[in-house]
Image: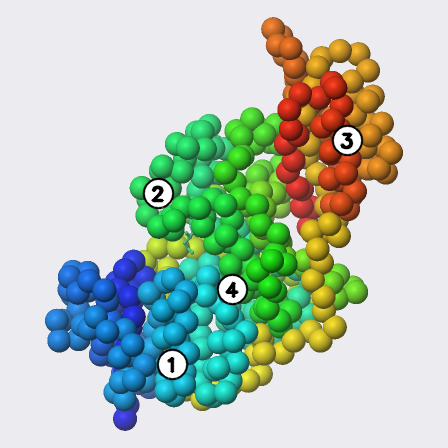
Amino acid sequence: MNTLRIGMAGCGTVGGGVWRHLAPHAELLRQRTGKDIAITKVAVRTPAKAQAVGVPADRITTDWRSLASDPDIDVVVELMGGTKEARELIAASLKAGKHVVTANKALLAECGAELFEAARRAQRQLLFEASVAGGIPIIKSLREGLIANRILSVHGIINGTCNYILTRMTGQGLEYAEALAEAKAGGYAEADESLDVDGHDAAHKAAILASLAYGFWVEPDQLYVEGIRNVERRDIDFARKLGYELKLLAIIKMDERQAVEVRVHPTLIPRTHVLASVSGVFNAISVHGDVVGETLFYGRGAGADATASAVLGDIAEIAAHPEYRKCKAPETACLNAKVKTMDEVVSRYYLRLDIVDRPGVLAKVAAVLGAHAIGISSVIQPEVHANTSVPLILMLHDAQEKQFQAARREIEALDVVKGPAVVLRVEDFA
Ligand code: HSE
C-alpha cells in the first residue's frame, strides 16, 4: 500500500489549513516521502464547517471515536482541542496501532508522560510539532538537530497574542484593552483569551520545551506562570528609558547542580538582545546548547498556514519513517534533575513604587533592600508636580526570589510607600 491514510479530528483554523494546503502539496510530498498522503476521513461536530473548506460530504463524520477504530486509517491527526476527548482519541488511536499527530499543547502539558508511554508501548509515533511556536520547527530541532547538546537554557517568546499586545502598547502607545481587542480581531487569540493573557498557553508550550530539553515532564504546579493582564504602559515606557523591552518570556534553564527552572512571566530584556526585536505576532526561541552555543529560531507561531506547515511536516515524517524511533528526547531523561521552586530562582528586578515626595524616602527604601543584601543598579525618579506621590523606579541586582519578595513586603509596608509595588523580572541571558 503506497497511500498514507489520514483521519483528521477537527476542522477549525488548523484543520482547515491542513486540508487546504495538502492538495496543492500532495505531489511534492509524494516525491519527498515516497507516499501518497490522503485525508480520507474528517471528524467534526458541525459538518458545514468541514464542507466550507471543501471536504466532500462522504468523508465527513460526526463520530470522532470512529477514527481510532477505522482499519482504513493509518494516522490520526488530532486537532479538536480540549483535553478530555482528545486524550481519549489519542490513547485509543495508539492502542489501535495508529500513529498520531497532535497540536494539543494543553493536553501534552497535562498528560504528556502518559501519552508518550502509550506511544512507546504501541511502538507508534506521537508527533506534535504544531503544539509549540506554530510553523517554527523547534520540536524537531530539539529532538534531532540539537540531540548532541546538553541544553543550558531555552528562552522563548511563544505566545503571539501577548507579543502582539505588548508590541502595540510599546510602539503605538495603546492601552492594554485596546491592544487585546486588536489581537482578538486578528484571529490569533485562543477562544478563551485568559489562556493567552494570563500566560497559560505559553506555560503549556514551556512544559513541552522543558520536556524536550531535560527529558522529563514538569508538573503543572512546578511551573511559575504570570501573564500580562496587569502590565501598564508607563512601566513599558520607564523600562525603555533604561534600555529594556518588555516581553512575555518563557525561561527554561538547568544549572550545574541539575536544578531546572521553568517559568513564564513578563520579562525585561536588554534592547541589545535579539529577542527584544521580535515584534507583533511573531514567535522566537533562543536555545543555548553546550556544543552549539546560542541558536535562534524565528517565525509565525500561530495561524492556519504556519500551523498547517507543522502538521504536514509531522505527517510527512510518518510517511517517510513509519517505524517507532526511540533515540529522541523526551524519552531520555536527565536522571538526577530536580525542579526549582520559584523561591529558589535568582533574577534581577525592576521595582516601581509610588512614594511620598519628601526627603529621606529613598534612603528608607534603600535601607530595606540593603538589609536583605539586594543591591541597586540604577534609579529613576521622574519629576512630577501637583501630585502627592511620585513614581520611583529601581533596577536591582541579582537576588533570590524569596529574599526579594521579603524585601518587597517590607517596602510596601513603609508609610512613605503608597499602594502595591510593581515588579518585573529582568533577564540578562548571562
Ligand atoms: N493563542 C496562541 C498564540 C496561538 O497567540 O500564540 C498559538 O498557539
In this rendering, the label closer to the viewer, 4 or 1: 1
Say which amino acid is labelled 4: Ala
The answer as to whether callout 4 falls within 8 Å of ligand 1 is no
Q: Give, as a three-letter code, the residue at label 2.
A: Lys
Q: Please give the name of the residue rendered at 58% of the width and 74% of the height, measured from the top-left corner.
A: 330
Give the residue at mark 4: 109
Q: Which residue is mark 1?
A: 92
For marks 4 and 3, give the one nearer the viewer: 3
Left or right of 89 on screen, residue 418 = right
| Residue 184 numbered tag | 2
Q: Is residue 328 above or below residue 223?
A: below
Per the image, label 4 sits on a secondary structure element best described as: helix
What is the three-letter code of the residue carrying label 3?
A: Glu
Q: Earlier in the sequence, mark 2 or mark 4?
A: 4
At numbered mark 2, what does the secondary structure look like: helix, strand or loop? helix
Labels 2 and 3: the sequence-earlier one: 2
Q: Does residue 252 appear in this view? A: no
Residue type at the position of mark 1: Ala
- Count neighbours of disc 1 (C-alpha within 10 A) and say few if under 14, some if 14 to 19, many if 20 or more: some
Residue identifier under label 3: 410
- Judged from the image, the secondary structure of the residue bearing numbered disc 3 is helix
Q: Earlier in the sequence, mark 4 or mark 3?
A: 4
Q: Earlier in the sequence, mark 2 or mark 1?
A: 1
Q: Residue furthest left?
A: 57
Residue 46: image x %, image y %? 19, 62
Q: Position of residue 191 (x, y in %)?
A: 35, 50
Please report whichever mark, 4 or 1, sits nearer to the chain's N-terminal start. 1
